[in-house]
Image (cartoon, rainbow, N blue to C red):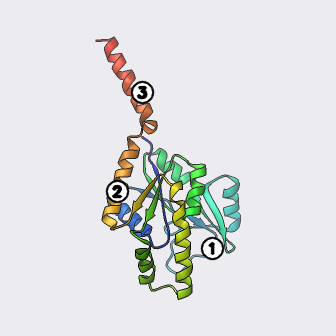
Amino acid sequence: MKGLLIVISGPSGAGKGTICKALLEENDFWISVSATTRQPRAGEVDGANYYFLTKEEFKKRIDYDDFLEYAEVYGNYYGTPKSNALKAIENGRDVILEIDIQGALKVKESYPEGVFIFILPPSMEELKNRIINRASETPESLMTRFKSAYKEINYVSKYNYAVVNDTVEEAVKKIHSIIVAERCRVDRVKDKILDSKEGIIHEQLYD
């Protein structure tokens, strides 16, 4: 059976990064690494944190349609490579893609059979507390992020599933349940059903 493309996103502070880390610790998922044209920061490793490309290399890959989605941000390109992710899926590996909401919606256009999961905070008050506890925001940037989160939550209806992140453990359990349910969908297993049906008919004919 082919693997699943599991796209996880949500507003800043919802905890999607922590959830993805926990999922990867418990499962043999293939993590999709983004590509970018920005310069590596101290400690970043090519192929682990990002694939660091020149603008010429990135634009060539755009021409070859080798991105599930891409965008230009402040003069640098960022994108999700397609070929490696699809190869892993064809080989039966589930692929986890943690991405922002706009990127997720672009992925949905090019790969609608993906599983799109929106991570929600327990409440907007809790979301605000989580952002404050990072201690990395100025009052102005905190207000900007909080306003942005209000807008981003409106996109939840574009997703297949919504998971409230009360605790990481419970959120991970819910995502595991979603994956099990997706594997049982008729449109994903119809070839296996048909093969089983043919096998039953063959046995009946030669009994």
Q: For marks 2 and 3, give the CA distance.
A: 30 Å
Is 12 situated above or below 94?
A: below
**Alpha-carbon neighbours of circle 3 within 10 Å: few (<14), some, or many (≥20)?**
few
How far across and down, in percent of the image, does residue 162 sit?
43, 58
- Rendered residue at 42%/27% (across/down): 194
Question: 93 above or below 37?
Answer: above
The one nearer the camera, 113 or 138, is 138
Q: Position of residue 169 (x, y in %)?
A: 31, 64
Disc 3 secondary structure class: helix
The C terminus: image quadrant: top left
Residue 46: give x, y in percent of width and height.
53, 69
Measured Cα–Cα span from mark 1 to mark 3: 49 Å
Residue at which label 1 appears: 38
Question: Which residue is the site of mark 2?
Answer: 174
Q: Residue furthest top?
A: 206
Task: Determine which of the numbered discs, if any, sits on residue 194 in the image.
Answer: 3
Q: Amino acid at mark 3?
A: Leu
Question: In the rendered view, does 68 fall on the left or right side of 94?
Answer: right
**Disc 2 or 1, which lies upstream in sequence?**
1
**What residue lies at 41% left-to-right and 45% top-to-bottom?**
182
Q: Earlier in the sequence, mark 2 or mark 3?
A: 2
Tell me if mark 1 has few (under 14), some (14-19) or many (20+) residues whose alpha carbon lies within 10 angstroms of its own.
some
Q: In which image quadrant can residue 132 be found? A: bottom left
Amino acid on which disc 1 is placed: Arg
Q: Residues within 10 Å of mark 2 (few under 14, many from 20)?
A: some
Residue 45: x and y, percent? 51, 72
Question: Which residue is at 34% across, 67% downward?
Answer: 166
- The amino acid beneath tag 2 is Lys
Distance from Cα at disc 2 to Cα at disc 1: 35 Å
In this rendering, the count of numbered labels is: 3
Q: Which mark is residue 8?
A: none
